[in-house]
Amino acid sequence: MYIASLNSGSNANYYYIGNGQEALLIDAGLSCRETERRMKQLRLAMGQVKALFVSHEHADHISGVPGIAKKYQLPVYITATTMRHANLPLDAAMVRSFKHGKAVSVGALSVLPFRKSHDAADPHSFMVSWWR
């Protein structure tokens, strides 16, 4: 499994997790253009990305979500509470809900969301596993 931080800090948070054939993004605090630039620099392929998971509604985690989701037609996994607080302009057909403690499969990747303590409406972290 390959994990890359595309950015981590108060201005933007963004992570890529993949297994060589498929990948997902955790949060999207950068613009689509900057995401593409950084992924190219790291030799990561957007074509392998199958989904985007949102941890919470703070701008440094969601500002790039609409652009990247629309351009690459990525399903966005987000809790209903976070979606309400984030007010993201997303195509409803691309929004997928997740719940604390219930794993979500994205190809051979399994994502287990769990609650965390943070100053947000419904913050989550994710444990990602790969079943070969």
Image (cartoon, grey):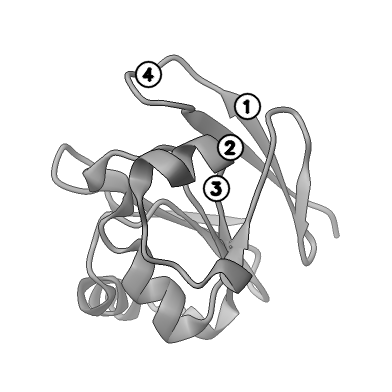
Quarter of the image containing the C terminus? bottom right
What kind of residue is marked 4? His
Quadrant in the rendering for residue 114? top right
Mark 3 or 1, nearer chain start: 3
Of labels 4 and 2, the one closer to you:
4
Which amino acid type corresponds to the residue marked 1 in the rendered image? Phe
Question: N-terminal of the two: label 2 or label 1?
Answer: 1
* Residue at position x 58%, y 37% in the image: 126
**Residue matched to label 1:** 114
Mark 4–mark 1 distance (CA, rounded to whole Å): 12 Å
Pointers 2 and 1 in contact (C-beta within 8 Å) = yes
- Circles 4 and 2, Cβ within 8 Å, touching? The answer is no
Which residue position is annotated with label 3?
78
Q: Which residue is mark 4?
A: 118
Residue 65 in view: yes
User: Disc 3 to disc 2, how far (Cα)?
Assistant: 12 Å
Q: Residue at x 84, y 54 (%)?
A: 131
From the viewer's perspective, is residue 34 above or below residue 5?
A: below
Q: Nearer the viewer, residue 85 or 15?
A: 85
- 116 on left or right of 40: right
Q: Nearer the viewer, residue 63 or 1?
A: 63
Mark 3 packing: few (<14 Cα in 10 Å), some, or many (20+)? many
Q: Amino acid at mark 2?
A: Phe
SS label for mark 3: loop
In primary-sequence order, the first of circles 3 and 2 is 3
Question: Within 10 Å of the Cα at label 4, are there few (<14), some (14-19), or many (20+) other Cα atoms?
Answer: few
Are dots 3 and 1 in contact, CB under 8 Å?
A: no
The secondary element bearing badge 2 is classed as strand
Quadrant in the picture for residue 75:
bottom right
Provide residue 94's location: percent of width, then percent of height. Answer: 58, 70
**Could you tell me which secondary element the residue under label 1 belongs to?**
strand
